[in-house]
Amino acid sequence: MKRIAILLVFCFAAVLQGAPKRAITETDLLKFKWAADPQLSPDGAQVAYVVVNVNEKGERYETALWLVASTPGAAPRQLTHGPRDSAPRWSPDGKTIAFLRGVEKDGKPQPPQIYLLPLAGGEPRALTNDATTPKGASSIAWSPSGDRIAFTATTRPDDFQPKKDGERESDVRVVTQAEYREDNDGYADPSRNTHLWVVNAEGGDKPLQLTSGDFDEFNQAWSPDGTRIYFLSTRTAESYYDAPDVNVYAVPARGGELTTVADIHGPIGAFEPSPDGKWIAFSGWESDTTRSYNESDLFVAAISGGAARNVTSSLDGDVLGGLAADQHPPRANRGPRPLWSADSKTIYVTVAAKGVSNLMRVDAASGRIEPWTRGNRETLTYTRASGRTVVLVSTPTIITDLFSVDDKGTLAQLTRVNDALFSELTLTEPEELWFDSFDGRKIQAWIQKPPDYDAAKQYPLILNIHGGPHAAYGYTFVHEFQWMAAKGYVVLYVNPRGSSSYGEEFGNVIQYKYPGDDYKDLMAGVDVLVARKLVDPKKLGVTGGSGGGVLTNWTVTQTDRFAAAVSQRSISDWASWWYTADFTMFQPMWFQKTPWQDPREFASRSAITYVDRIHTPMMFIEGESDYRTPPSAGGEALFRALKYLHRPTVMVRFPNEPHELSRSGQPWHRVERLQHIVGWFDMWLLGKKNEAYEKGLRR
């Protein structure tokens, strides 16, 4: 009896303390959930949002709509069960939510259609269908009166015509434009453009097509009086011959001629008309020269006409910018846009600067900028109604959750999407590091240490390089870093020169010199960790994807200090990439001439030129449907060359995966990618054998 009593005491103590936590694993990704696309009700009382999760087989992502109060304390409730529900949008009276739903037919997913969900109760009803919109709908927006919904679609008149018996649609592509395919979206159809439509919210009528022609219209918004619909468009054939130029246009809500609303010397991004209908706020940039990196600013223009004003020109930071991460919502992800105060005097925007992204308030008349929220986080997007604001936030220990924001910028958590899983895990915050590079330039970086870090030990290092090259790491959740640290590595991630959110001079200093001095910044960061004896100088690994793959390839041609490297979705031959990427380099952003005009310049910055210098064991990770950095211009070329040289190398190819493999690829593929990266480092840094990398080799 005494032993039983003692055992009960220990059990009770264990319950009080909670079950012991464990290290995060690569397969935890299959259990992650992501909150996305929050939308406040018109009265500001409730938030509709999307929850993304991985299906039971780990094959795909599923999306459903949820609802939570905009004040803390209430439990969220699920509105729909998906599996392909997204884009919730409140009717102006707050009684109905319009959303997009994709269904399956004969086992195949169909284009999404518009559904209406009454908040008073009842099942959603379809507002559009394959008979009214054969190619589906996207980008929905209610009219201010709530009687109509605008949307975009690629439907053509011939889509309504029944096919004759035996008639088949040709799968032969006639390509006439230089940009004929896009990563993650596939091959373009020049005969099928995205146009604006409106449909009666009560149903019954066929949708009305408002725009037509050879150009796309997107990101529409109603004027406050409901008479016009604003949208973005580039209305120039083969616009890749020119500098980027996107304008805001308007079309009467009942149809008619298009007019230009806002036009700057550069591209316009997300926009929003003011509540009084007099102004339009938008992100964008202007430049008289072709630059590799342009910092996004906030502009205000009078809808009645006149030049736009840049109201954040003095700010070093990316307006509506974000941070590089592997756990942004893989589906239903909607970026931020400017939002106005009810009196049309203040504009709210997110700004990414030096590793964080927070809200700022901008006076529309004077341009006075006031920080609103502060802290080490990434604010992915936000929503505002009736004086209330809700933000979607990520931190190094939060994937995505909703928080309310009061007038002083204090955040209160509304959702805890991953708490059930994260209560089991040991997650750690990174250590921020600033250091001087070779020329005295200040560089920001972070160190992710193992959960059981022991200062008396030296750890193997993984230098993880971001892509872009104009992107930035920071205080956001990165599963890859947490898992590598849990496997016993110190992870160093750096924002070298060329990174975004540090000003245009910092970003453009690498123009026509990439890769180059940015590599030296990375090595200076490694030197700091070696000098502090945090890491074992004989157990250094380096990896990176896209632009990070470019720098990984470059690094191993410049030094032999790394014991292993994993290059992902990279470029090793700039000339080959110039000819095969999904977008053109007809504008001299990175190279001043073409490969045939200046072959030496392209060769001098290509890792393939120096392949004989590579002695570091290399793994190459490639998506077989990657049109952004085609394998033949990246890892595939280096792999074949290294095999010729009898250097240790392996290539891992992921079928049907585009450039977005690490961020939104098939869930199991994302897990296997992580397993291969760490498996390669385990083999060469820790001496762990892996038969998969040695099969079929000559002995």
Image (spheres, helix red, strand yellow):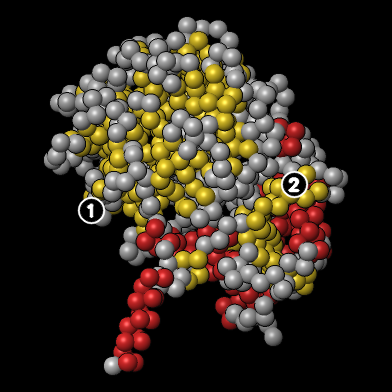
Across and down, in percent, residue 88 comes to: 31, 37
Asked if 386 appears above or below 292 in the picture, the reply is above
Across and down, in percent, residue 9 comes to: 35, 81
| Residue furthest out toward the front | 2
Observer-nearest of 273 and 187: 273
Residue pictured at 33% horizontal, 12% vertical:
225
Q: Is 660 placed left or right of 153 in the picture?
A: right
Q: Is 184 placed left or right of 266 in the picture?
A: left
Q: Quadrant of the N terminus?
A: bottom left
- Residue 638 image label: none
Across and down, in percent, residue 153 comes to: 34, 31
**Residue at the disc numbered 1:** 106
Observer-nearest of 579 and 695: 695
Amino acid bearing label 2: Ile
* Number of callouts: 2
- Residue 443 image label: 2
Residue 260 shows in the view? no
Amino acid bearing label 1: Asp
**How far is disc 2 from disc 1 in space, using C-alphas?**
55 Å
Classify residue 617 by image quadrant.
bottom right
Across and down, in percent, residue 331 comes to: 40, 47
Observer-nearest of 534 and 479: 534
Observer-nearest of 133 and 395: 395
Residue pictured at 65% horizontal, 22% vertical:
313
CB contact under 8 Å: marks 2 and 1: no
Q: Is 126 placed left or right of 279 in the picture?
A: left
